[in-house]
Image (cartoon, rainbow, N blue to C red):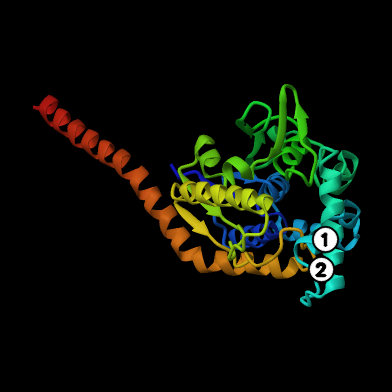
C-alpha cells in the first residue's frame, strides 16, 4: 500500500502564486498528490488545482485574470503603495502623501468591517473558483480558516468551495469576514499559516509543506500600533515554525521579499516555486520511497512467517 501524500500550501497572498510552480513540478515528475490542504492563497491555488489537476491550465487562467485588471477594483495596489512606497525619496511631499493614504486606510477600517467591501471581495475571488462543493474535487481537499467569534480553528472538508476558500483568504482589515452559521471567519493564517496539522487530520502519511512566508525585516519602533502589529507578526511566525517541524519535507520558494499585495509579476513567483520544488525533488522521492518500505515491511514479514508456518503444517500433515 502506497503512502498517502498531502501537499500543505501555506498563505502569503501574492507570494502564494509560487504554489503553481510547485504543482507543475510535481505534475511533470509524476509525484503522487493524494490530498491538498490550503491556507489563504494556498487554499485558493490548492482548491483550484484539486478541482482540475492541471497546473498549466491554472497558470494560464490566473495570468489572464490578473491581466484583466479586475484585481485593481479591490484597491490592492493602493495598499501595496501604502506599505511599500515606490519612491525611495522620503521628502516632505512623498511622506505627506503616504501619511494621507494611511489616514484614509485607517479611517475606513475604523468604521467598516474591512477596507474592501463584501461585493468587491466576491468580484475579486469568485470568478476563479468553481461553483461546486469540496466533495466534488478530483483530489481530496481541505482548507483552514479562523473563527474570530468563537476563537476556534476551522477546517473545511465539505460544503461550497467558494465559501471555504473566501473564508480562508479573508485577510483581517483588508477583506471582510465571512459569516457561516454562528461563525465569523477570517484568514486561516492566524491559526495555521502552513496547514501541516490539517494535512495530518486528513490522514496523510507524508506531508510536504510549501512555505511562502515573508521575510521578517528589522523593526524600527515608531508608534504603539506598530509595536502591537509587530508583536502579532512575531507570534504568528513562531507558531508557523512549530507547525513546520511536523512536516516531512518543507519547500521554501524564494519569494519572501515580494509584497503580499504585489501581483504584478506572477511568472517570476511561479518560477521561484518551480526552482524550489526541483531542488527538493530527489529528497521528496526518497521520503516517499522510505515510507513505502516502512509500510510494506511489516506486511511482508507477516506473510513470510505465514508461509513458513504453512510449509511446516504441510510437512507435518504429510507425515
Q: Residue furthest bottom?
A: 89
Which image quarter holds the C terminus? top left
**Label 2 element class:** helix
Image position, residue 74 (x, y; %): 87, 51
Q: Residue furthest left?
A: 319
Closer to the camera in the image, 311 or 306: 306
Mark 1: give few (<14), some (14-19) or many (20+) Cα within 10 Å. few
Residue appearing at x 85%, y 38% in the figure: 112
Label count reads 2
Up the image or down, 264 lies above or below 233; here it is: below
Disc number at residue 99? 1
Residue appearing at x 82%, y 43% in the figure: 109
**Label 1 element class:** helix
Closer to the camera in the image, 213 or 38: 213
Image position, residue 169 (x, y; %): 72, 44
Query: Which quadrant of the view contains residue 159?
Result: top right
Which residue has dot 2 on it? 95
Mark 2: give few (<14), some (14-19) or many (20+) Cα within 10 Å. some
Up the image or down, 311 lies above or below 37; here it is: above
Image position, residue 83 (x, y; %): 75, 61
Which image quarter holds the N terminus? top left
Instruction: Report whether residue 137 is seen.
Output: yes
Q: Is residue 235 left or right of residue 85?
A: left
Assess whether mark 2 and mark 1 are in contact (beta carbons under 8 angstroms): yes
Up the image or down, 148 lies above or below 196; here it is: above
Amino acid at each position: 500500500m502506497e503512502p498517502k501524500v498531502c501537499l500543505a500550501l501555506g498563505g502569503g497572498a501574492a507570494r502564494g502564486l509560487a504554489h503553481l510552480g510547485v504543482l507543475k513540478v510535481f505534475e511533470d515528475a509524476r509525484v503522487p498528490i493524494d490530498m491538498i490542504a490550503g491556507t489563504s492563497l494556498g487554499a485558493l491555488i490548492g482548491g483550484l488545482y484539486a478541482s482540475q489537476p492541471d497546473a498549466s491550465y491554472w497558470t494560464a487562467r490566473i495570468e489572464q485574470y490578473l491581466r484583466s485588471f479586475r484585481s485593481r477594483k479591490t484597491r490592492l495596489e493602493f495598499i501595496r503603495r501604502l506599505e511599500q512606497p515606490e519612491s525611495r525619496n522620503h521628502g516632505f511631499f512623498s511622506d505627506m502623501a503616504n501619511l494621507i493614504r494611511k489616514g484614509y486606510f485607517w479611517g475606513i477600517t475604523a468604521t467598516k468591517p474591512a477596507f474592501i467591501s463584501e461585493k468587491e471581495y466576491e468580484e475579486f475571488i469568485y470568478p476563479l473558483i468553481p461553483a461546486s462543493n469540496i466533495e466534488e474535487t478530483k483530489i481530496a481537499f481541505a482548507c483552514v480558516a479562523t473563527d474570530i467569534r468563537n476563537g476556534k480553528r476551522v477546517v473545511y472538508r465539505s460544503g461550497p468551495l467558494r465559501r471555504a476558500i473566501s473564508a480562508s483568504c479573508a485577510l483581517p482589515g483588508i477583506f471582510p469576514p465571512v459569516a457561516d452559521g454562528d461563525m465569523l471567519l477570517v484568514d486561516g493564517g492566524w491559526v495555521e499559516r502552513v496547514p501541516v496539522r490539517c494535512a495530518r487530520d486528513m490522514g496523510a502519511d507524508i506531508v510536504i509543506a510549501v512555505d511562502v512566508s515573508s521575510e521578517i525585516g528589522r523593526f524600527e519602533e515608531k508608534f504603539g500600533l506598530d509595536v502591537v502589529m509587530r508583536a502579532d507578526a512575531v507570534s504568528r511566525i513562531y507558531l508557523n515554525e512549530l507547525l513546520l517541524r511536523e512536516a516531512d519535507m518543507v519547500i521554501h520558494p524564494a519569494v519572501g521579499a515580494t509584497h503580499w499585495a504585489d501581483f504584478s509579476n506572477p511568472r517570476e513567483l511561479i518560477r521561484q516555486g518551480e526552482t524550489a520544488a526541483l531542488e527538493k525533488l530527489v529528497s521528496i522521492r526518497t521520503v516517499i520511497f522510505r515510507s513505502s518500505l516502512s509500510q510494506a515491511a511489516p506486511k511482508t514479514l507477516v506473510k513470510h512467517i505465514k508461509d513458513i508456518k504453512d510449509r511446516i503444517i504441510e510437512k507435518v500433515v504429510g507425515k
